[in-house]
Amino acid sequence: MGYSTTDLSSNKAVNWGIKHESVALDEYHDKHSSEHQNISVLGSGLLIDKVVVFWVHLQPDAVVCSECGRGVASASISEVFV
């Protein structure tokens, strides 16, 4: 498909986001636990659709489960560099 690869392991903003992702997901849990019973926010990796395996996938930061249903969460974390 012609995708280029870039090593982001030395990028300050990317490393800051990785370091703080769990904090953001903990805060997500705390904020929504008052609205949803038995909520859990579980770290996740690549998810592949079992029916259309060859092209439908996503990579959320967490899978969210509660008595209301299931969903996914993506923590977009940014830091302003001055």
Image (spheres, rainbow, N blue to C red):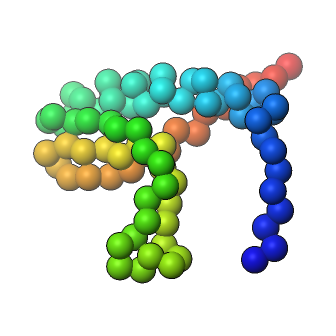
Q: Which residue is pictured at 43% across the width and 65% down the height?
A: 48
* Image coordinates for residue 75, horizontal then vertical, percent: 52, 38
How many badges with numbers are in the image?
A: 0
Residue found 79% across the figure and 67% down from its top: 3
**Position of residue 39 measured from the top left corner of the image (x, y, whole percent):** 22, 36
* Residue under the point 26% across and 52% down: 70
Quadrant in the rendering for residue 18: top right
- Give above or below for 34 relative to 82: below
In the figure, is residue 66 to the left or right of 43? left
2 relative to 24, above or below:
below
Front residue of this view, candidates 75 and 18? 18
| Apparent side of residue 61 relative to residue 7 in the rendered image (left or right) | left
Quadrant in the picture for the C terminus: top right
Residue drawn at the location 26% of the way across and 35% of the way down: 40
Q: Quadrant of the N terminus?
A: bottom right
Question: Looking at the picture, does residue 49 appear above or below residue 79?
Answer: below
